[in-house]
Image (cartoon, rainbow, N blue to C red):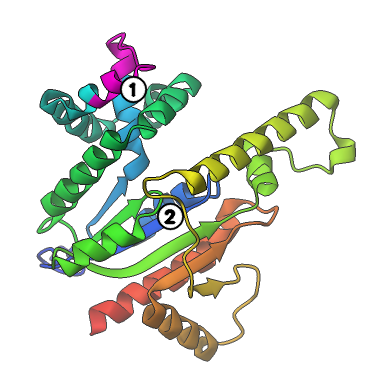
């Protein structure tokens, strides 16, 4: 007799929703991927990278030779129904792309720059949020857990929950100092005095770039990136002394519904994800037991 792959024979009627937001290159995407790998052993999991929608629009504009420096033209571009439909098609196709091809298509430096231009146009935000709601609604009835990785997603998760579409059980805020994030990006972990001039310049440039992105995200008019207040703060470096202590931590995180994870330590992201995932899984289990 075959053992069922998933815990439930049919997807949950109301999927559990987890939103993940945070600072640039802080590790929220890595956390989302690791969390999906862990959860999909027991649940049907669907992950949405909200920022990817901007990148898809940018890639389309580049492919079409579009004048992406014209703000009015960008607005017309994103409001075009055919272009919106193509974004959805590309998102679906991207899920089946090999990692190298996917990164080469959507994470080139030029794509990142053009994506930022689209992000400055208010109409783009309206469109990608509308696409987000449609994407979540389309996933209902197919998945047990939905994750949204993107800037300032807590309020949209709450709105989806208020509409009865999902059960928004946890909003996660990933924090990371720009210098630490830059060290991970460049893989330059040696003390500054031991770095070559070339590596030091690369580290400084990357740190400044991440700081600029964080500052820009915090200042933008539409959906500025903000820290989630009154969150339960998980110290990923502090050993959990007992099961009783862990149960108390899990209960508090579930009660608050907001979890803050500080990745500002010069360790690999893998060393952070294990305690984070353990706690998040426990919060999910508590929500399923209600």
Please identify the residue farthest to the right as the structure is shown: 193
Residue 10 visible in this rendered orientation of the protein: yes
Magenta part of the protein: which range? 60-75
Q: Is residue 154 shown left or right of residue 30?
A: left
Q: Nearer the viewer, residue 273 or 74?
A: 74
Residue 3 percent location from the top left of the image:
18, 65
Position of the N terminus by quadrant = bottom left
Please give the name of the residue rendered at 12% of the width and 55% of the height, measured from the top-left corner: 142
Q: Crowding near pointer 1: few (<14 within 10 Å), some, many (20+)?
A: some
Residue 43 visible in this rendered orientation of the protein: no
Position of the C terminus by quadrant = bottom left
Relative to 65, say whether 57 is above or below: below
Please tell me whether residue 63 belongs to the stretch shown in magenta.
yes
Residue linked to disc 1: 71
Residue 111 percent location from the top left of the image:
42, 23
Relative to 9, say whether 92 is above or below: above
Q: Nearer the viewer, residue 231 or 126?
A: 126
Please tell me whether residue 285 belongs to the stretch shown in magenta.
no
Relative to 3, say whether 203 is above or below: above
Please give the name of the residue rendered at 19% of the width and 42% of the height, measured from the top-left corner: 131
Residue linked to disc 2: 21
Q: Secondary structure at mark 1?
A: helix
Report the label total. Answer: 2
**Residue 117: quarter of image:** top left
Q: Secondary structure at mark 2?
A: strand
Sequence-earlier tag: 2 or 1: 2
**Residue 280: quarter of image:** bottom left
Residue 8 percent location from the top left of the image:
16, 69
Q: Crowding near pointer 2: few (<14 within 10 Å), some, many (20+)?
A: many
């Amino acid at each position: 007799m075959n053992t069922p792959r998933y815990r439930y024979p049919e997807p949950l009627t109301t999927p559990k929703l987890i939103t993940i937001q945070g600072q640039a290159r802080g590790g929220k995407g890595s956390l989302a991927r690791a969390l999906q790998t862990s959860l999909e052993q027991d649940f049907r999991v669907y992950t949405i990278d909200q920022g990817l929608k901007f990148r898809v629009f940018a890639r389309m504009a580049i492919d079409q030779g579009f004048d992406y420096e014209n703000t009015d033209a960008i607005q017309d571009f994103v409001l075009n129904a055919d272009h919106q439909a193509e974004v959805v098609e590309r998102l679906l196709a991207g899920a089946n792309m090999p990692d190298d091809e996917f990164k080469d298509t959507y994470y080139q430096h030029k794509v990142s720059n053009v994506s930022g231009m689209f992000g400055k146009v208010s109409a783009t935000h309206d469109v990608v949020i509308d696409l987000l709601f449609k994407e979540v609604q389309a996933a209902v009835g197919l998945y047990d857990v939905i994750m949204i990785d993107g800037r300032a997603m807590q309020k949209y998760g709450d709105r989806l929950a208020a509409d009865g579409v999902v059960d928004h059980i946890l909003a996660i805020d990933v924090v990371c100092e720009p210098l630490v994030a830059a060290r991970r990006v460049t893989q330059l972990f040696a003390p500054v005095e031991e770095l070559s001039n070339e590596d030091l310049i690369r580290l400084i440039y990357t740190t400044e770039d991440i700081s600029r992105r964080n500052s820009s995200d915090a200042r933008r008019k539409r959906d500025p990136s903000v820290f989630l207040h009154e969150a339960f703060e998980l110290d990923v470096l502090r050993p959990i002394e007992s099961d009783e202590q862990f149960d108390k931590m899990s209960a508090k995180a579930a009660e608050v519904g907001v979890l803050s994870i500080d990745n500002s330590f010069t360790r690999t992201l893998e060393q952070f994800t294990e305690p984070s995932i353990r706690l998040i899984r426990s919060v999910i289990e508590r929500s399923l037991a209600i």
